[in-house]
Image (cartoon, grey):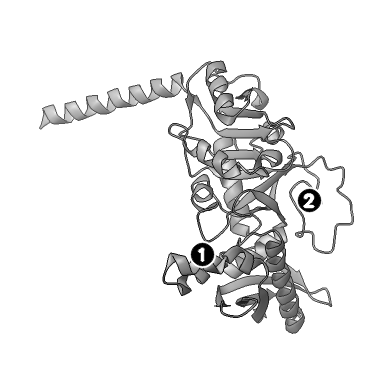
Amino acid sequence: MKKMIVFLLLSAFLLTGCAARQLEEDLLVIVLTVDRSESGDVTVSVKAPRSAASGGEEKSYLMVEATGLTFSDAMTMLNAATPRPLNFSQSREVIIGEDAAKREDFARLLQQIDALPRFRCSAAVIVCKGEARAFSKAQKPYVGTRLSRYTETTLTNYAGKGFTPKTTLCDGVRDLGFGFCDPLFILGAVNDFSGATSSPAENALDSLAGNLPRKSEEAVEVFGAAATDGVRVSGYLTGYEMALLHLMEGHVEALALRDGQDNTLRVLAARPAEIRLELSRKPVLLSVRVFCEGQYTPGHPVDEAFIAEKLRQDITAVIRHLQALRCDGFGFGCHAVRQYLTVQDWEQLHWRDAYCSADVDVRVELRCMEN
């Protein structure tokens, strides 16, 4: 028995030593970025912690980049240019520049990234306005010291509140062009604060990353979503539009609306929306019944009918916006396909065209109470 215990302890020690040496010898990639130039060249970069950081936070992470005619060429050059083997097992983010995301080979690009050796496919995908390299370079762990932990916590926080999607690389590869729900990717941007004013719009949440009315040492913003049409990114959704989609799905934390008397109501989802589709109708009818709960400050009741009507109009506008982008971001297709027994019948529907031209009927049931 004692010999067995000694053997197990030695084995654990040896395994730990091997793992430590492996981490010392590899370049642990936290962020991978991909950009396209006007000529079509691909530039990739990686951000990784230095083995022996010194001189402050700005020197604790190493960025290496390379350019090639294709993504494969760029990755080959990147591997040749880095001082250590690239290890993608700890990757937290994949950042795609908008020029690369709007090309027809966007789905293929995600598949190539997913095929990289040991790539962490649960990494979040961010579509960045402008250059992905600039976005990655501006990212710093303002709270805490580890960028990997900071980015993961930040993205989880925004998705939990409802202002961004929760799409990972796994989700994107699975659904883009192959599923019945078009993936929505996190929208990111670097804000230079040149457009921030002391008088923000009536609904500050109805904004895109890069244009939020705020001032901060942290210029990086993730807010809203990049919509896809089965092939590539076709447009953007604001943080408010994304929150309304989360409300329909049955989870939102930080959605607040004002009535005509400037009373504020915190809106929560009572349960996921009921979806009914009339596919035999021309045009197809998308019916959505949304169930909400509202909490207001004691002594300041809100105009319940006003808020319910605003939600109805805004949810209708979000669905119409997705239709205009040819993006079934809410997943109406998942409900539609269940009404068909064969693949042939489903294909004859031409779902995307039917969805984009469909009528929309939204009903909102709202129950308010004191907080």
Q: Position of residue 291 (x, y in %)?
A: 60, 77
Query: Is 135 on the left or on the right of 215, as rendered?
Result: left
Q: Is the N terminus in the top left, top right, bottom left or bottom right quadrant? A: top left
User: Tag 2: Cα neighbours inside 10 Å, few (<14), some, or many (≥20)?
Assistant: many
Instruction: Residue 250: tell me if it is visible.
Output: no
In terms of image quadrants, where is residue 118?
top left
Query: Is 243 on the left or on the right of 310, as rendered?
Result: left
Q: Nearer the viewer, residue 315 or 324?
A: 324
Q: Is residue 125 above or below residue 166?
A: above
Query: Is 67 on the left or on the right of 302, as rendered?
Result: left
Q: Residue furthest bottom?
A: 305
Label 2 SS:
loop
In terms of image quadrants, where is residue 289?
bottom right
Q: Nearer the viewer, residue 308 or 20?
A: 308
In terms of image quadrants, where is residue 138?
top right
Q: Kindly identify the residue that appears in the image at 55 percent across and 33 percent down.
A: 30
Q: Position of residue 77 (x, y in %)?
A: 57, 20
Q: Kindly identify the residue that appears in the image at 53 percent across and 67 percent down.
A: 348
Q: Nearer the viewer, residue 364 or 152?
A: 364
Work out whether mark 2 precedes mark 1 in sequence or the reverse, and give the earlier one. Answer: 2
Q: Is residue 278 above or below residue 71?
A: below
Amino acid type, label 2: Leu
Q: Which mark is residue 93?
A: none
Q: Which residue is mark 2?
A: 212
Q: Kindly identify the residue that appears in the image at 74 percent across and 70 percent down.
A: 257
Q: Which residue is mark 1?
A: 347
Q: Is residue 95 above or below residue 335?
A: above
